[in-house]
Image (cartoon, rainbow, N blue to C red):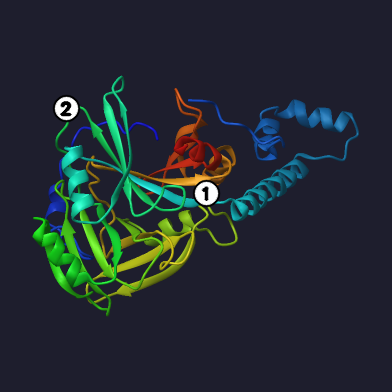
Amino acid sequence: MARIMPMTASSIRPSLSSLRFCRFCVSHSSSRKFASFHLGTAVPQMQSFGIKASKLLREKGSNFSIGAVGSMAHASTATTQENVLDWVKQDKRRMLHVVYRVGDLDRTIKFYTECLGMKLLRKRDVPEERYTNAFLGYGPEDSHFVIELTYNYGIDKYDIGLAFGHFGIAVEDVAKSVELIKAKGGKVTREPGPVKGGNTVIAFIEDPDGYKFELLERGPTPEPLCQVMLRVGDLDRAINFYQKIFILQAYGMELLRTRDNPEYKYTIAMLGYGPEDKSAVMELTYNYGVSEYDKGNAYAQIAIGTDDVYKTAEAIRLGGGKITREPGPLPGISTKIVACQDPDGWKAVFVDNIDFLKELE
């Protein structure tokens, strides 16, 4: 996938560092345009004609008024949104992998394979760009959600920040998994036990770079790497962006459930492209009264498969998202992507499904 460039480590704001965070806290190709003309732009263009436009319409004896143009513009915009929404519903999307930076690739691979039971699926070294990728997971990339590690030459440490939460791994026996991790020298930051305010048995571990993993006790599942938890400053805004009912689904995700925990002052929302027990999901967490977080420079983005990166870009724009890389092929390879970010600044890359499968061949 696209190179994840190193970033300057940002300092944690004093006002944030003193907060007690809940919810398991840490103590260049141009875009293709639609063939149809966007009448939404017609009104300001007509208005720019001023008096001459009005005079011309009167002289031609036309019954077509600027007000009518405005009505048509509104109708066209609504139709465009409806068409994009219909397409998004049919788009074959799934979460492909989560991308983040590590300071020692071999050390991280060793921890993930020995302690977490993952497999090293492939590596890709790009010396001319001075970075290496490693893909790890519990099954092949064409059918499983996996991890993409990025090592940038010469950089051995990153700031995880306070906004990133954790990754979730479903296991059949949390206690046994913790014993194995301890035997391999892994760091356990929360011993096995019921989640606060619930019954699910969980534990927390930490990898050599400081990323946290939540172990969740569940029955057999086709998708053991099951969650990416990110903190957001406005939960309703985030839900509306990822899944706007009756208006537009920017990412086309389904809101699976929400859970409010007033005792510990946080609310979570689970979103994804399938049920939690069979698919990887995003867990968005809102801590009461906290609207902004320091993101650091370690966590990068989630990659999502799509049938058409150009139409996906239109959906993201209509949904209020920010395109950070216009849709088109990556330099040097034919894989088409579009990069964007949500209202909280979390990044995602949409990857052409066919191109992605070719990349795996």
Q: Between residue 242 and residue 149, name the one nearer to us.
A: 149
Tell me if 228 is positioned left or right of 274 in this view.
left
Q: Tell me: residue 74, above or below residue 5.
A: below
Marks 2 and 1, Cα distance to the nearest angstrom?
39 Å
Give the number of the mark in front: 2 or 1. 2
The residue indicated by pointer 1 is 319
Tell me if 31 is positioned left or right of 79 in this view.
left
Q: Tell me: residue 276, above or below residue 353.
A: below
- Dot 1: element: loop
Q: Residue at x 34, y 55 (%)?
A: 138
The tally of labels here is: 2
Q: Residue at x 29, y 60 (%)?
A: 168
Q: Residue at x 20, y 64 (%)?
A: 24
Tell me if 167 is positioned left or right of 41 in this view.
left
Residue 4 is labelled as none
The residue indicated by pointer 2 is 154
Which quadrant of the figure contains the N terminus? top left
Q: Position of residue 141 (x, y in %)?
A: 42, 47
Q: Residue at x 20, y 38 (%)?
A: 105
Q: Amino acid at mark 2?
A: Gly
- Image quadrant assignment for residue 115: bottom left
- Dot 2: element: loop
Tell me if 226 is positioned left or right of 294 in this view.
right
Label 1: how many Cα within 10 Å (few below 14, some 14–19, many 20+): many
Q: Is residue 10 visible?
A: no
Label 2: how many Cα within 10 Å (few below 14, some 14–19, many 20+): few
